[in-house]
Image: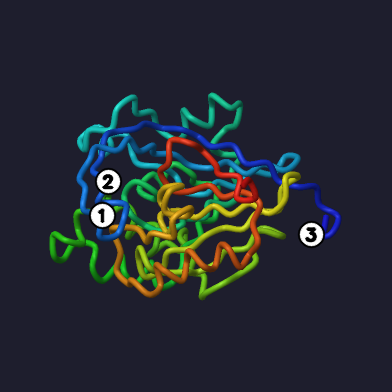
Amino acid sequence: MNASTAPAWTITPVDLGSRIAHSHWFFYLEPSSEPLRIVYRAWLLARGGEYVLVDTGPPVDEARRRGIEGMRGIVDGLADLGVDAGAVATVILTHMHWDHAAAADRFPAARILAQRAEIDFFLNGSDGHPAMSRFFSHREMMRGLIAEGRIQALDGDATVHGDLRALRVGGHTPGSQMVAVPTAQGLAVLTGDAIPMNRNFRQAIPNGILVNLPDAVAALRIVRTLDADRIYTGHDPEPFLDVREP
């Protein structure tokens, strides 16, 4: 089945847990540190018998250590949707922070895709200065997946799994990427933490956690340039935002 004749994908958010965070973590130069509830999730893309997962959510042990409430693992989250983890053909990591990628070993049958810049960032900086290392966990396991070729590198924008588009944007991390998905409702974009909350998009505010401010600002513009109909941001309690609503 080629991309032109394939049916549209469906996107199902897989909620895994939540916690209270500080608003200035997510909104660049936000003067307030008011509490903000954030959700940890992955996104299941389905088409016929095909399954693609965008991000894996956090591993249960690390999530509980960091105070995530109501935590369940991604395998259980998928099982509640009637999907076996072994049926997932492709996992696309928007970036390799612990809460988006460190359960990647739960998908032994899947190919796992990340940007080369993200893999290099993980290998060269994840256990260095605490300002970087705090965002990673399960390093030995993740390095093993890279060494075994289980995590495969993308070099910039790429079409994957037929008609899904991985878009490297950077900003939040060097290899942050978004995923553009054709759906029955129009074009959807899964932004990862390039755009962590719906308010970031509405008010064009970069993420408060970033490595490159110009790239973070450009990521906000890229979504608008794509003329998307719906976006799925990284941590907002509302699972999607209809961009075309007034």
Helix, strand or loop under label 2: helix
Residue 55 point in image, percent of width and height: 47, 48
Residue at left offset 40%, top offset 51%: 196
- Label of residue 15 in the image: none
Residue carrying label 1: 30
Q: Name the quarter where the N terminus is drawn.
A: bottom right
Question: Mark 2: few, some, or many residues within 10 Å (few <14, many ≥20)?
Answer: some
Q: How far separated are the C-alphas under marks 3 and 1?
A: 42 Å
- Res 174 quadrant in image: bottom left
Residue 234 point in image, percent of width and height: 43, 48
Q: Which residue occupies the extreme front position in the image?
A: 246
Helix, strand or loop under label 1: loop
Residue 185 point in image, percent of width and height: 72, 45
Q: How far separated are the C-alphas under marks 3 and 2?
A: 40 Å
| Relative height, residue 109 to residue 203 (above, below) | above
Q: Is residue 236 left or right of residue 9?
A: left
Question: Mark 3: few, some, or many residues within 10 Å (few <14, many ≥20)?
Answer: few
> What is the three-letter code of the residue carrying label 3?
Ala
| Relative height, residue 36 to residue 178 (above, below) | above
* Sooner in the amino-acid sequence: mark 1 or mark 2: 2
Residue 63 point in image, percent of width and height: 28, 37
Residue carrying label 2: 23
- Res 171 quadrant in image: bottom left
Q: Is residue 212 left or right of residue 13?
A: left
Helix, strand or loop under label 3: loop
Callout in the foreground (3, 1): 1
Residue at left offset 41%, top offset 32%: 16
Q: How far separated are the C-alphas under marks 1 and 2?
A: 7 Å
> What is the three-letter code of the residue carrying label 2?
Ser
* Sooner in the amino-acid sequence: mark 3 or mark 2: 3
